[in-house]
Image (tube, grey):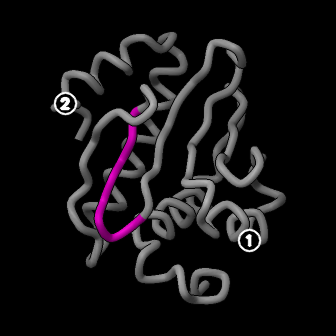
Amino acid sequence: MNVIENQVVANAFKRYPPPMQEKLMHLRQLVLEIASETEGISPVEETLKWGEPSYVTTSGSTLRIDWKEAQPHQYAMYFHCQTKLVDTFRRLYREQFTFEGNRAIVFQENDEIPVEELRHCILLTLTYHSRKHLPMLGV
């Protein structure tokens, strides 16, 4: 799962500073693991959207990851802003994560990521279409 088959995506990862490359690859690995381990998640396409590594599946909502030079000590996982995803994550995990509006979970470079909670957020994203009608996405 560490090999990026889409060369455009691989090139996007190469432009990140090495410490951030590692952190973003960890987020990528979580997304791909959850997608491969969970029944009902359609195959994930790894592509670029808005110049950012993106993970698209027909069973869920698009998820993106990125580091921005303007905020060199942070990186983020982005979600579609017109979904209930980030609002739900905020209600569930307000103490564990830092949020940016209704579109992102933001990490500082030295944060210890609460992996189980993040895995849950990723799972809800990749299965969003079957949950979007449920209060709190069915959690």
Q: Quadrant of the C terminus?
A: bottom right
Q: Are marks 1 and 2 in contact (CB under 8 Å)?
A: no
Of residue 1 and residue 135, the one placed in the foreground of this image is: 135
Q: Residue at x 58, y 89 (%)?
A: 134
Q: Type of residue at label 2?
A: Asn
Q: Which residues are magenta?
A: 53-60
The answer to if 99 sits in the magenta stretch is no
Q: Is residue 125 above or below residue 45?
A: below
Mark 1 or 2, closer to the camera: 2
Of residue 87 and residue 110, the one placed in the foreground of this image is: 87
> Farthest residue toward the left?
5
Residue located beneath label 2 in the image? 6
Of residue 54 and residue 33, the one placed in the foreground of this image is: 54
Relative placement, left or right, of 99 versus 86 is right
Residue located beneath label 1 in the image? 92
Q: Position of residue 26 (x, y in %)?
A: 45, 37
Mark on residue 16?
A: none
> Farthest residue toward the right?
95
Q: Residue at x 81, y 61 (%)?
A: 94
Q: Is residue 66 above or below residue 43?
A: above
Q: How many marks?
A: 2
N-term-proximal mark, 1 vs 2: 2
Q: Type of residue at label 1?
A: Leu
Q: Quadrant of the N terminus?
A: top left
Relative placement, left or right, of 73 versus 11 is right
> Farthest residue toward the front?
82
Q: Residue at x 31, y 71 (%)?
A: 38
Q: Residue at x 24, y 67 (%)?
A: 42
